[in-house]
Amino acid sequence: GAWATQILDEHPGTWVGVRRLVREGICPRPETDNYLLGMLDHHNGLPRQKGVQHALTADPELLDEVWKLFTLEGGGEWSLANADKYCHPDHSWERGLVALAADGTLDRARLLVASLEALERDFAQYRAGWFSRFHEALTPTVPERQERVERYLSLLSSTIPPTVTFALNAISIVQNAGQLPAKTVLDPIRPALIARSKGTVTAAIKLLDRVVTSEPASRSDAALIVTDALTHESADVQKAALDFLDKYGERGVAQLTVAIQEKADNIAATLRKRLRPWSTIAVPVPPVEKTAFIVPAEVASLTPALRKRIGIDAIVALAQSGKGSLTAVDLDGANVPRLQIAIEPIRELDVVIDAFATILESPDQPDELERVLDGVSSLCSEHPDDFDQRIGPLKKRAMTLLKRMGSGYLEHVGPLPDLCCLALAWATGNPPGPSPGLKQLHTTPSMIQFSLHRLAAITKRVAIRDARPLLAAPTHAGGWIDPRTLVDRAREHAAVADIYDQVQSLLRLAPEHRAQALKGSTTVPGEYGDALRHALGAERVKYGPTAALWIAAARARVPFSNDDAVRKRHPGLGPDAAEAARFLPVSSQRQQAAHFVITAEPPTPNAVAVDQPTVALIRALKPTSRGDTIGLPDTATVRWLATLWPLALESYFAIGAMRLGGNLDWWEALWSNRCYLKTLLGPDRPMGPMARLLLALGLAAKDPAESQLATDVLIAAIDDGRLDGPMLGGTMRELLLTGIVKLPRWAKTLAAASRVSSLHAWIIADAIQNLLTGDATEPLRDLHTVLELLNELLETLDIALTLPAAHEFLSYIPASGKAKPLVKSILSRSAVSADIPSAVLERAIVGRVERAIRWRNSS
């Protein structure tokens, strides 16, 4: 019995064998939940070739276990929801239990109650959905629903939106049959009126409408309750609530008037006029007032050059003229100070051992990972008498992790197994053997293979105690290297450094202090010295034969332009070799939601040398690539990849956009995709075309965590002055043409960001106008969702359309349904105006002054 419980706890899929032992009387029934969950799986559970009904009747003792299933949520693949999702409908638990209820084997009334009791436990939405679907599959009659109406009413306070919707539908059926007194429903329905789901609240209001129609005496109490819905963020919900109040509310009733006024600040700007009949005080004014522009006092302490560089003077000029456009700060990566947070190298044995142990548990900290690599590389020759004792715990942990991952050699699938191998090489002096697939990886490398080969080279040196600092160890957070420090390192170690360390060091050169570093680089020997000087801006160098070095030097020198001198010496190596990559518009590609395509020019070679990582990044975009052995990289891989070439992350963001674009509607989100979005949060991160594409896709993602993170990025980028309306709207327009995005998702995330400040409202209104341009002959699905937001923003800002092209687009687009009145409302506002409210400019200048002060202090 103890053994049976143990193996079930390890894996519920062992249920079939355990069940046979129980039936034969060899062991007692295990008292573990996994005994119940194990019988659910469609592969390892009940033998269901003839369905659940047959399987349960063939083993009657299991009929008593059925009721316990309604008390368990399960998890992962072990739940009723998951069991039925991945099996034929005829073999499902839902159909089987319904059949057993129909033939009287199982008590139908008890099943109805059991399913409602399960919903009361507030299981996770995915798993709770099975119980509501099963309840409806039993097709309860009106009397059966009436008998259980108290339970339905209690479910209105559920935290699971679909459960609330299910309960509302059941209550509506009872109410339509005339079996639901108003006094029974009024108080319990209040949680549904403040639910997040728009559909839930509107359904609750409709139910109350029918209740009041049946019992007019309840109108006053119902009207007071409906005021709760005025706090909802959706203008549609607020409108439905106001419609109800206009229909049933009695003006002049103090309690009702006060309740409405308490919610007045939350009412959409387009609906505020409807509050006037309910007002005892003036209707709240729009949040943006046209007041005098105030220049922050800190501006006076900034140099003219810095003010101009960050666009502060341009905002002051806008405030003075009242005309013009609000444009983003010009950031290209190379004109931004990067040496802001210094990294202290590790030069003590115990410190690096402790840091190594930490990074094995959290390998998704790239700066700390690099600090550990440099520390081990520098100290690997130090072997005091008690070295084995000191490194013993690290060695043991590395062996445990490798065993858990089923790996005993360099797998090249991510940093963690390779870091474990490095720890063992350091501890034992025996480097792990290469993966059988390593030879193939040299010819078709994935986007991360360069970094893993670099780690492998370090591992081999550490095993033979060949100690030296790494050229490529970052001196500052974000993967940056101070050029002056690299020159000092190169004088001593460049001649013996491996190609991976040399290439990585060039790609991490910060933009600051390059001229000073160039003066001191004359004594750096060899081809690496020539490549380093070229990267730092030297005019005349000897271009050597090692393509990898010169590609890295070219990308460090001119990250966004072609390097003609290097191209002449090393031609035809692909995008982001000697020639800068040029990404084609996504609207020109044939896109589909399951496979998002990004194409770059010049053409990418089918085979890329592993020591050419900038080209390999572009190669990873090719849908036919088989070299990307990672497939779906983990968070550690994605974050480490961001430090490979920090000066120009467009190809990195292109990979993120490709992965996110191909996963917009997948039911299961990929955690690593969020890492690409998090990288965009950096206040000095340029919002280039691929960065904007990644952001626009994130704003349209189905996964709430991804869309919320993208919303946070949008808010930060507007506050930082990194993003303006044409930049965002143009990218969204290009993406809209692919047909893979859904406008309601954009409307939701843009609305959330627009509520932060008047600046955010202005930029997003400008972005929507730039989205609504171009060909106006084809109707757009769900166009009303973004039109509703635009109409609301224009009302909030008290402005008309500012973009003539958007005015023309809306004048000709074949709008119908909900979109038609919205188009009319937007176009009815006064003539196109470009006035920017002072509150918008004041918020905009604050973010730019903060950037100027940060840059000044870092110089």
Image (spheres, grey):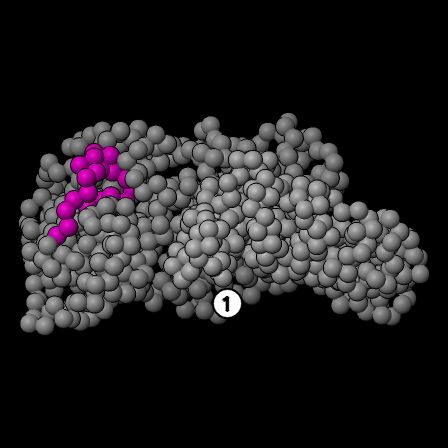
From this view, report whether residue 539 is shown above or below residue 603.
below
> Which residue is painted at 22% across and 58% down in the image?
399
- With respect to residue 606, does 766 lie above or below? below
Judge the density around disc 1: few (<14), some (14-19), many (≥20) Cα neighbours within 10 Å: few
Q: Is residue 682 magenta?
A: no
Report if residue 631 is visible in the image: yes
Residue 142 horizontal side relative to residue 452, left or right: right
Q: Please tell me which residue is depicted at 36% across the width and 52% down the height of the picture.
A: 635
| In the foreground, 586 or 810 | 586
Q: Of helix, strand and loop, which one carries label 1? A: loop
Left or right: 32 as drawn, with respect to 492: right
Residue 761: % across, % down: 60, 54
The residue positioned farthest toward the front in the image shown: 25
Between 327 and 186, the residue placed more toward the observer is 186
Residue 119: x %, y % from top left:
65, 56
Q: Residue 314 placed where, x, y %?
A: 48, 54
Where, quadrant-wise, is the C terminus in this rendering? bottom left
Q: Identity of the amino acid at label 1?
A: Pro
Residue 304 seen: no
Residue annotated with mark 1? 296
Q: Which of the image's four quarters has the N terminus?
A: bottom left
Q: Position of residue 426 (x, y in %)?
A: 13, 60
- Going 82% across and 54% down the picture, which residue do you hit? 146
Residue that appears at 66% across and 53% down: 115
Residue range (magenta): 431-454
Count of marks overlaid on the render: 1
Determine the image quadrant of residue 369.
bottom left
Asked if residue 440 is among those painted magenta in the image, a careful observer would answer yes
Q: 318 or 853: which is nearer to us?
A: 853
Residue 592 or 7: which is nearer the viewer? 7
Taking 233 as reference, is 718 left or right? left
